[in-house]
Amino acid sequence: MSVQIKLRRATQSEWSSLNPVLLDGEIVVETDTRRVKIGDGVALYDSLSYGFNAGTVWTVNPFFMV
């Protein structure tokens, strides 16, 4: 079975302009910088730290998926 995950994405200025509260665990991508932020369900976008780069390769173990 193949699984496809689509992340919300916009430019850095678009995200800053919207400045939403991201859902807990929600991952969003800045399309122009390729940087990523992960929501905590409380903090506004601009106050969140950056996570990994969008070009990072992940390996997913399907046995641990909920």
Image: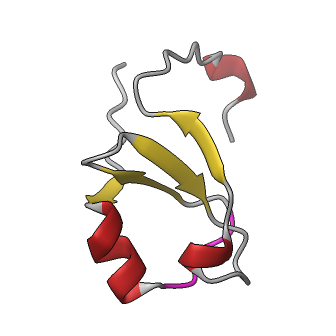
* Residue 41, image quadrant: bottom right
* Residue 47, image quadrant: bottom right
Residue drawn where x is 35% and y is 53% of the image: 30
Residue drawn where x is 58% and y is 13% of the image: 59
* Residue 22, image quadrant: bottom right
Whether residue 22 is visible:
no
Q: Height in image: 64 above or below 51? A: above
Quadrant including the C terminus: top right
Going by the image, does 30 lie left or right of 25? left
Span highlighted in magenta in the image: 20-24
Give residue 32's position: percent from left, percent from top. Answer: 25, 48
Give residue 43's position: percent from left, percent from top. Answer: 70, 81
Q: Is residue 3 magenta?
A: no
> Which secondary structure dominates the residues rendered in magenta?
loop
Q: Is residue 23 magenta?
A: yes
Quadrant including the N terminus: top left
Residue drawn where x is 73% and y is 84% of the image: 42
Give residue 2's position: percent from left, percent from top. Answer: 33, 21
Q: Height in image: 27 above or below 19? A: above
Give residue 27's position: percent from left, percent from top. Answer: 52, 54
